[in-house]
Amino acid sequence: MFTVVIGAVLTCIVSVLLVMKLHNQTVNSAFVVNTDGSIIPLKLVTQQENLGVEVLAHLELFHTYFYHIDASNYEKYLEKALWLGNSSVDALYRQKKADGGVYNRLLQYSLIQKVLSIESTIDIQEEPYHFETKTIFEINRGSIIDTYELTTTGNLIHVNRNFPKNTHGLLITDFLKIHYKS
C-alpha cells in the first residue's frame, strides 16, 4: 500500500511539473490554426528586427503616392502621401501646387505621371533614420513620353501607427528634393 501512495504522489508531482512547463511555454507563444486544421506557432519579433523592411516599404509607399499620379487619382494619392510626412512634405506639396500649377497642368492636359522604379538607401543605426531615394518616373503627354530621375532625401522618425493611414508608424521629416533631371 505504501508503494501505491508513493507512486501516486510521484505521478501527481511529475504531472504538475509537466503542466507548469507546458503552461510557461504556451504563455509566451501565439498559435494560428491553418486552413487545413493544423496549428502554426507564431514567433514574436521586435519592431527593430523588421525596421529596415518597414523603412523601405514606407519610402516606397510615400514616393508612389506622391509621384505616381494622374488626373483621376492625384487628390486621393496626395492625401495619403501627406499622412506619411510632416510639414516639410506639405511645404513641397504647396510649392508644387503654387509653382506654375503642376496639378492644374495635370488636369488640363490629362497628363499621366507613372513611377517606374524606387531605390532607397537608408541608415537605421539611430533615430532619426536618414534616407536618400532615387525615383525614376515618366510623364505621358499623349504622344510624348518623358522620363525623369528625382533624388530626394530626408529623415524618418517613429510615430504611433495609424491604420490605414500610416501603417508603418514612421513619419518623413526634413524632406528635400535635391536632384531632378530628365
Image (cartoon, helix red, strand yellow):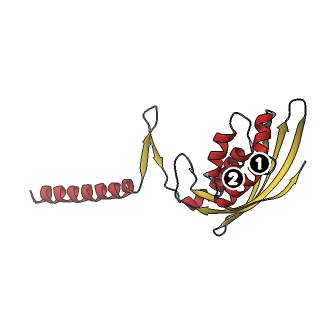
The image shows residue 12 at horizontal and vertical percentages of 20, 56
Question: Is 19 displayed left or right of 52 in the figure?
Answer: left
Amino acid of disc 1: Ile
Asked if residue 131 can be seen in this view, the reply is: no
Which residue is tagged 1? 118
Mark 2, secondary structure of its residue: helix
Tell me which corner region of the image, top left, top right, bottom left or bottom right, holds residue 155: bottom right
The image shows residue 58 at horizontal and vertical percentages of 65, 52
Q: Which of 17/127 is in front? A: 127
- What residue sits 82% from the left and 52% below the top? 150
Asked if residue 120 can be seen in this view, the reply is: yes
Whether residue 7 is situated above or below residue 103 in the rendered picture: below
Q: Which of 147/49 is in front? A: 147
Decide: marks 1, 2 in contact (CB < 8 A)?
yes
Of marks 1 and 2, which one's residue comes earlier in the chain?
2
Which residue is tagged 2? 59
Whether residue 74 is situated above or below residue 63 in the rendered picture: above
The image shows residue 5 at horizontal and vertical percentages of 12, 58
- What residue sits 71% from the left and 45% below the top? 64
Quadrant in which the N terminus appears: bottom left
The mark found on residue 77 in the picture is none
Amino acid of disc 2: Leu
Q: Which of 150/75 is in front? A: 75
Question: Is 17 displayed left or right of 115 in the figure?
Answer: left
The image shows residue 112 at horizontal and vertical percentages of 79, 35
Picture mark count: 2
Mark 1, secondary structure of its residue: strand
Q: Residue furthest top?
A: 143
Tell me which corner region of the image, top left, top right, bottom left or bottom right, holds residue 2: bottom left
- What residue sits 64% from the left and 70% below the top? 126
Question: Is 59 displayed left or right of 26 in the figure?
Answer: right
